[in-house]
Image (cartoon, helix red, strand yellow):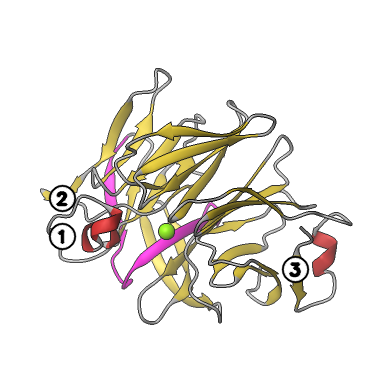
Amino acid sequence: MSPLFQAAQGGFLDLFPEGAELTRLAGDFTWTEGPCWIPARGCVVFSDVRQDRTWRWTPGSGLAEEMNPSRHQNGHCLDAQGRLVACSHGDRAVLRQEEDGRWTTLASEWQGQRLNSPNDVALSPDGSLWFSDPTYGIDKPEEGYGGEMELPGRYVFRIAPDGTLSCPITDRHKPNGLAFRSANELLLSDTGDQAATHLYRIDGDRAEHQGGFFQVDQGKTDGLRVDADGRIWSSAGDGVHVFSPQGEELGRILLPETAANLCFGGADGTELFITASTGLYHLPTRVRGW
Ligand code: MG
């Protein structure tokens, strides 16, 4: 289908090849999330959080089941060695997949109390992994295996390259999607009542709030990504909103359903994969993920 673009500034359409087609690669899911392109396997892995499964889509061969049950995995990223890292609502943990396919637990508790339900994870240029820990996976029976909140809040944690866990961000209501745009700048969406995406200045395992950075006016920002030129690609209630590095809206890719997350991938890193409610969408671009 022809993509529905809504430009807010000149030049927005130049981000896409002429005649770019928006494709619904697969559908019939319940709540898709956590897309991650895995270069070594040439596929995108994503979650259907509520269906308790993960799936992969491979150019040429299409859709296949990845894990069933997935223990309600949600967000994914690659670590500095290219291994898949997963947020598991069901295990209330962040896990890493080893070469033999088995999962190693990287974080499951903080100061003796279980994590809530890790939601999304991002790799920092310094090799650390940062993840958000809201309570959706224990509050919503369809998104996990239930349980009580043990921690006093909903935080963002950092797993250092040596495995040490720290808790740099404690001032958000419902921290969710994360994206680094440099070694010392982190964008973090908050899907609480005052939904917005915030900017933090990062120094090692310290994070300093710089204020709200942008806010989508349709739904909320859940997952987000940064491209190689510093633009921010945010999920939203009506699709994907693209912002300049300064946080001004450049335009939108309108979708018929709510987008929860997205990633860049494909052989050259320019293809956009969007997890939007019941579907996985694909759109070629002329930019590359950072
Ligand atoms: Mg999320």
Verify whether residue 177 appears in magenta.
yes
Residue at numbered disc 1: 151
Residue labelled with disc 3: 4
Residue 223 image point, x, y percent: 50, 59
Res. 10 in view? yes
Q: CA distance from mark 1 to mark 2?
A: 7 Å
Q: Secondary structure at mark 3?
A: strand
- In this rendering, which labeled residue sits more in front, label 3 or label 1? 3
User: Mark 2 — residue?
Assistant: 114
28 within the magenta span: no
In primary-sequence order, the first of circles 1 and 2 is 2
Over which residues does the magenta segment extend?
163-185
How many numbered marks does the figure carry? 3
Q: Residue 98 occupies which quadrant of the picture? A: top left
Q: Are marks 1 and 2 in contact (CB under 8 Å)?
A: yes
What is the crowding at mark 1: few (fewer than 14 residues within 10 Å), some, or many (at least 20)? some
Instruction: Give the mark nearest the N terminus, 3 or 2.
Output: 3
Please tell me which residue is depicted at 26% across the width and 64% down the height of the picture: 154
Answer left or right for 94 relative to 203: left
The three-letter amino acid code for the residue at tag 2 is Arg
Mark 3 lies within 8 Å of ligand 1 (Cβ measured): no
Q: Amino acid at mark 3?
A: Leu
Q: Where is ligand 1, by quadrant? A: bottom left
Can you name the residue that lies furthest to the right here?
18
Give me the C-alpha separation between circle 3 and circle 2. 43 Å
Is 54 or 250 nearer to us in this picture? 54
Q: Name the magenta segment's main secondary structure.
A: strand
Q: Secondary structure at mark 1?
A: loop
